[in-house]
Amino acid sequence: MKKLSFKIIGAILIAILILQYNIVIATSTTDLKSEQNENNKKINEAQSDLNEVQAEKTETVKQVEELSTQITDYETQIDELDGQISQLNKKIEQSQAELQKAQEDYTKQEELLNARLVATYEAGETSYLDVILSSESITDLISNYYLVTELATNDSELLDKIQEQKEQIEKAKKDLENSKQELATSKANKQSISTQLQTAKKEKDAKVEELSGEEKKLQQQIEELNQANKSIDAKIKAMQAQIEAERKKNNATSSNGTSGATQSSGSPSSSGFIYPVPSAYAKVTTGMYYSSGQYHGAIDFGSGGINGQPVYAVADGEVIVSERLQGSYGNYIIIMHDNGLFTLYAHGQDGSRTVSVGQRVKQGQQIMRVGTTGNSTGPHLHFEVRVSPGLYANRRNPLNYL
């Protein structure tokens, strides 16, 4: 009986100990969960704060980018207006020259008419019929008749010419006035857009000051790239004009310097393009936008081991730029293709460019080697596709053409 009592008491003690242990465990677990929930709450609050900060930065960067685009648009409009103004000035010069010539011709014809009228007056009442009837022979009659006919014809033509010249003068004057009015309008438009451009630049400068140090550094690189591209755009226009002039002169496209081994970099796409690097390295590491959200306007091929790999012309065409910039693109080449598209290849190794301006290239022909010159953080090929007229603002997603 005593043994049974000891067993019961022992069991009760064990049960009490287990119960206390479970209570401690439950309390500890509850505390831990409570602490975990509190930590999660803090994490969520911190993440929310971080998201707000990132959103603010992203919005500021976005505003800077929008202002940059607006500035580019204004500058493009100003360039177009400068072209219009130049053409109008030439048209005005031409109209003035035509007006002067018409007035000179009119003066000459007027002098001839006056001389004819004086001669008629001095001849008195003599008429064409008197001249014919005064003929002494049939030969004289025919001669006088021919003379009278010529005089009448000349008089009629003289009057017609004078009338025509009057009309030409009036037209030239009207064209001149229209051109001057168009010129005044174009200049006024340019002034208005220039004012908007200056305002946008001030707004952009203010927004740039709000950016972080890293964002400012990136923005500076973008500014350098934009400045370089303005110079490049001017070279593209000049080269296109030169090529067009040569084509007109020769009445055919010359095949200058198509030598050079061609290699395969995959089959041509529906647009007729192959990849600009060997297929083993044709991996896109950066798309049309950087990870920061900034617009890139190109794609990068930057696989491991790509340094020194050949860069190929993606299609037949003509080299319109081949040079090195200290920053920006570094060693770069622009090709104008026969299908009307343009491609740009940048950051090539120093001394690796094998083609020059005006040279014809074949699809798959090596034009340089992959490097890291200019604004580059590592070896890669920066590749752009542009639609006509091939300027910086005409960039398109290369993946749509490869």
Image (cartoon, rainbow, N blue to C red):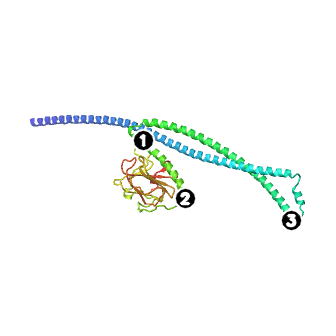
In the rendered structure, the answer to whether residue 158 lies left or right of residue 28 reads right
- Tag 3 residue: 139
Amino acid identity at mark 3 = Thr
Among the two numbered marks 2 and 1 on one chain, the one whose residue lies closer to the N terminus: 1
| Depth order, front residue of 392/246 | 246
Among the two numbered marks 2 and 3 on one chain, the one whose residue lies closer to the N terminus: 3
**C-alpha span from label 2 to label 1:** 40 Å
**Which of label 1 and label 3 is nearer to you?**
3
Measured from the top left, where is residue 274 in percent x and y? 44, 58
Amino acid identity at mark 1 = Gln
Helix, strand or loop at mark 3: helix
Measured from the top left, where is residue 286 in percent x and y? 40, 49
Amino acid identity at mark 2 = Arg
| Depth order, front residue of 36/4 | 36
Q: Residue at x 33, y 35 (%)?
A: 42
- Tag 2 residue: 247
- Tag 1 residue: 220
Can residue 10 be seen in the rendering of this structure? yes
Measured from the top left, where is residue 32 in percent x and y? 27, 36
Give the number of the disc on residue 147.
none
Q: Quadrant of the N terminus?
A: top left
**C-alpha span from label 1 to label 3:** 96 Å
In the rendered structure, the answer to whether residue 147 lies left or right of residue 352 reads right
- Dividing the picture into quadrants, the one containing residue 314 is bottom left
Helix, strand or loop at mark 1: helix
Vertical side of 24 occupied by 246: above or below: below
Q: Residues within 10 Å of mark 3 (few under 14, many from 20)?
A: few
Farthest left residue in view: 2
**Which of label 2 and label 1 is nearer to you?**
2
Q: Residue at x 89, y 57 (%)?
A: 130
